[in-house]
């Protein structure tokens, strides 16, 4: 169980303690109209997790009351997802459609109590009669129908005597209720549609508000946990159960915040659009945030569970950074999977003084990973290295092979460049090199100093493989749809070369390709003739920073060699720093690792936190932004200093500027060396928190998007994110997101 108890578990514990519930029964109730996504994973973790923590039970229930878009293939996908995440729903999957007869009987009961009536207004009239937030609604004249007439009409609705929309069953509650949902909500509508399970038995289908509470009751659910947008529906939920007198062992509804993740879309409707438009290869495209997509890409269930656990359960909607999910998979695979060598963009190297045929022993795991296993690495005269691991005229700080600088071939020898062969166009096609026989990894007596070790493969032994390099599907942090797709989200490398043991031994399905990232043997397209690997995630977060030139990417990889523990283990003093950072200062281990292993960074960091005691925010900036600058420069070459970074963070902490703006200010500091407070003042970057400044912008956004306003008013409350995003955009990211959120909610609701 999670250490920090969330508010739902607190409620559950109180209910058990007070004797309100003897057994905890929850349910996960998806509508089978699309593949489940990471948001569903969160709901699955909550519902199944709570049931299991308190020795209860969680039902998997298909909420199949809207036959137009539902299908068995989605039922299967939902079952797969729950199973893959490691949960068990017991002996059977439940379906709301199994309860149609019972739900129908409850409707009859309400009619008999004069608590429900058949209305015959048109859809437009119903909307009109509902009133507005400030005005009470007006009841339909049909509400005066007698119980007998209602019973007769309802039965005929069921028998299929009327057309769609001709009549509708409504609860008789209160057309003046402050909660608009309580203004005689709809209970049953006519739909002459084939249902994928109930077939053509029904011409009427219950609405969510009627079916859900009753299904929960029928299944003996104790805690009905749903997302925040159903908060106002809770009154109907209670009204139905109370009015029907379903008192004993009745369920109660609790709401939590939906999970939103940046750089992706999440609703099944939007995902379906991408699938149908052919923008992705299917629901399991590795770029989609679907469970099937993550599974195909190579994510592990553990990483997703850890992610869901880590983000916690909140009562206010928020956006989670996808980098957090990426961190979880990296963290999971780091100590689990074999490390092997694959060259994605090969450059031939001929080692002129080597004629042998050696097989080198190479462990699959670094020393600090408590796992055993090794393979033979064939070494020969002709090898391939990564094209960007050689540069003829290197910039300062380039640590790999150059005409002057030797490099170690990982697990093998040190080589140096003797000659660069070019084609007629001046492209480098081959390197002639020399190796040092006494520099063999593990028994190196050469005394030659190198700054990094690179991956390589033996030309005659390497296997050709296809590598699919996936990047984020959207380039926009808050994408609206297809127009924001990242054109470079998939790069297919047909002729990558991999060391032979990966293919012949297949020690695992997932690998770390040294210095490249984590990869997964594609579960569908991989064959012995044509092995295919999917990139799961890189070794380090490369987003959030500006798009880099290829040269800079190359450099950041040098960095990786140092920090990923491949070349140097942590020294004692580095270890001490690391322990202090992860312990007392509470930094995450990735950031702590970056700082502790780099003297320049750790002393910069220490100086900054002594000027402003905000260790986490400062650590993030130093480990990312400052580290990027220090790749090419020494500290005294920087135009800014640690104290100024401390000032920058101070402005974030006291909400003078947003995180987003802080990045902008940092870029300016890099260029001009100006004081951050000056930059903020002179460029007018101060965060706008004053409602009177934000309100006019919200008005403008509302005026510009009448369609979305209508959709929102019609119940699509998720659009709130859209409006907030537009307002933030309009202020160039300067508006205080929290204030905007509150104001938008107040105005629209
Ligand atoms: P979508 O709009 O993405 O299609 P939905 O809410 O319509 O989602 P359902 O199939 O009705 O999807 O949801 C099943 C369960 O999963 C519900 O209890 C719902 O509240 C929950 N759920 C759906 N999306 C999220 C999310 N993003 N975060 C947390 N829970 C979610
Ligand atoms: Mg839905």
Image: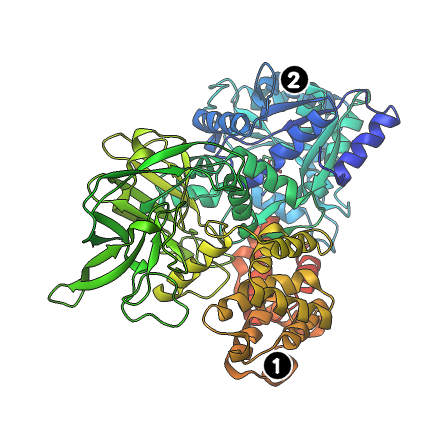
Q: Position of residue 649 (x, y in %)?
A: 67, 70
Q: Is residue 497 above or below residue 246?
A: below
Residue topped by disc 2: 102
Please tell me which residue is depicted at 79% across the width and 31% down the height of the picture.
12
Please tell me which residue is depicted at 32% across the width and 58% down the height of the picture.
389
Q: Secondary structure at mark 1?
A: loop
Q: Position of residue 737 (x, y in %)?
A: 65, 63
Q: Position of residue 612 (x, y in %)?
A: 72, 70
Residue topped by disc 1: 684
- Image quadrant holding the C terminus, namely bottom right
Mark 1 closeness class: few <14, some 14–19, many ≥20 residues within 10 Å:
few
Q: Secondary structure at mark 2?
A: helix
Query: Pointers 1 and 2 in contact (CB under 8 A)?
Result: no
Q: Mark 1 vs mark 2: which is more N-terminal?
A: 2
CA gap between label 1 and label 2 equals 63 Å
The picture quadrant for ligand 1 comes to top right
Residue 701 visible in the picture:
no
Q: Position of residue 438 (x, y in %)?
A: 33, 50
Residue 218 vs residue 78, the one in the foreground: 78
- Image quadrant holding the N terminus, namely top right
Please tell me which residue is depicted at 22% across the width and 54% down the height of the picture.
349
């Amino acid at each position: 169980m999670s250490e920090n108890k969330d508010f739902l578990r607190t409620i559950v514990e109180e209910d058990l303690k007070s004797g309100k519930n003897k057994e905890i029964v929850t349910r996960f109730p998806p509508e089978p109209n699309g593949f489940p996504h990471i948001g569903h994973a969160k709901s699955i973790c909550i519902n199944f997790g709570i049931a299991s923590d308190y020795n209860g039970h969680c039902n998997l229930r298909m909420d199949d009351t809207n036959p137009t878009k539902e299908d068995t293939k989605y039922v299967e996908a939902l079952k797969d997802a729950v199973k893959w995440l490691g949960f068990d729903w017991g002996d059977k999957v439940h379906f709301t459609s199994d309860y149609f007869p019972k739900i129908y009987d409850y409707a009859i009961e309400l009619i008999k109590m004069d608590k429900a009536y058949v209305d015959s207004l048109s859809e437009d009239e119903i909307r009109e009669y509902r009133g507005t937030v400030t005005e009470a609604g007006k009841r339909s004249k049909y509400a005066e129908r007698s119980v007998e007439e209602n019973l007769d009409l309802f039965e005929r609705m069921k028998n299929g005597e009327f057309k769609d929309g001709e009549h509708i069953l409504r609860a008789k509650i209160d057309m003046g209720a402050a909660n608009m949902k309580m203004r005689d909500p709809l209970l049953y509508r006519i739909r002459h549609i084939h249902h994928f399970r109930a077939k053509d038995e029904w011409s009427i289908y219950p609405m969510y508000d009627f079916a859900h509470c009753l299904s929960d009751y029928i299944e003996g659910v104790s805690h009905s946990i749903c997302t925040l947008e159903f908060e106002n529906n809770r009154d109907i939920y209670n009204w139905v159960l109370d009015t029907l007198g379903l008192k004993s062992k009745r369920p109660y509804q609790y709401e939590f915040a939906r999970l939103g993740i940046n750089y992706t879309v999440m609703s099944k409707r939007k995902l379906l659009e991408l699938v149908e438009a052919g923008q992705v290869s299917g629901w399991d495209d590795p770029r989609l945030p679907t469970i099937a997509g993550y599974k195909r890409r190579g994510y592990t269930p553990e990483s997703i569970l850890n992610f869901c656990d880590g983000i916690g359960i909140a009562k206010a909607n928020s956006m989670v950074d996808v980098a957090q999910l990426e961190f979880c998979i990296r963290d999971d695979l780091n100590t689990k999977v074999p490390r092997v060598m694959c060259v994605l963009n090969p450059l031939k190297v001929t080692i002129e003084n080597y004629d042998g045929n050696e097989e080198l022993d190479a462990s699959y795991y670094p020393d600090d990973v408590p796992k055993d296993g090794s393979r033979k690495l064939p070494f020969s005269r002709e090898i391939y290295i990564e094209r960007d691991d050689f540069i003829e005229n290197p910039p300062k700080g380039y640590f790999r092979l150059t005409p002057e600088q030797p490099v170690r071939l990982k697990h093998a020898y040190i080589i140096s460049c003797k000659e660069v062969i070019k084609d007629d166009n001046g492209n480098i096609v081959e390197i002639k090199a020399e190796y040092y026989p006494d520099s063999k990894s593990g028994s190196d007596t050469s005394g030659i100093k190198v700054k990094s070790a690179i991956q390589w493969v033996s030309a005659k032994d390497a296997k050709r493989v296809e590598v699919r390099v996936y990047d984020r599907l959207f380039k926009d942090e808050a994408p609206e749809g297809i127009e924001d797709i990242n054109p470079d989200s998939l790069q297919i490398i047909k002729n990558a070369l991999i060391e032979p043991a990966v293919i012949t031994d297949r020690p695992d399905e997932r690998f770390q390709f040294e210095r490249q990232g984590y990869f997964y043997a594609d579960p569908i397209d991989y064959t012995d003739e044509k092995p295919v690997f999917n990139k799961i995630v890189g070794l380090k977060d490369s987003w959030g920073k500006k798009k880099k030139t290829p040269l800079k990417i190359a450099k950041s990889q040098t960095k990786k060699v140092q920090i990923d523990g491949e070349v140097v283990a942590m020294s004692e003093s580095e270890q001490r720093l690391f322990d202090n950072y992860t312990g007392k200062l509470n930094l995450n281990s990735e950031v702590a690792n970056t700082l502790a292993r780099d003297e320049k960074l750790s002393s910069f960091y220490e100086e900054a936190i002594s000027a402003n005691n905000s260790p986490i925010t400062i650590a993030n900036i130093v480990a990312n932004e400052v580290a990027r600058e220090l790749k090419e420069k020494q500290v005294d070459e920087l135009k800014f200093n640690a104290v100024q970074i401390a000032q920058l963070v101070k402005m974030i902490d006291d909400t003078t500027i947003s995180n987003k703006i802080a990045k902008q200010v940092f870029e300016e500091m890099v260029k001009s060396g100006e004081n951050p407070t000056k930059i903020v003042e002179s460029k007018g970057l101060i965060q706008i928190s004053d409602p009177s400044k934000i309100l006019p912008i919200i008005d403008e956004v509302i005026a510009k998007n009448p369609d979305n306003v209508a959709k929102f008013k019609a119940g699509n409350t998720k659009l709130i994110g859209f409006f907030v995003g537009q307002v933030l955009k309009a202020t160039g990211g300067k508006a205080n997101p929290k204030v905007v959120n509150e104001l938008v909610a107040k105005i629209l609701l």
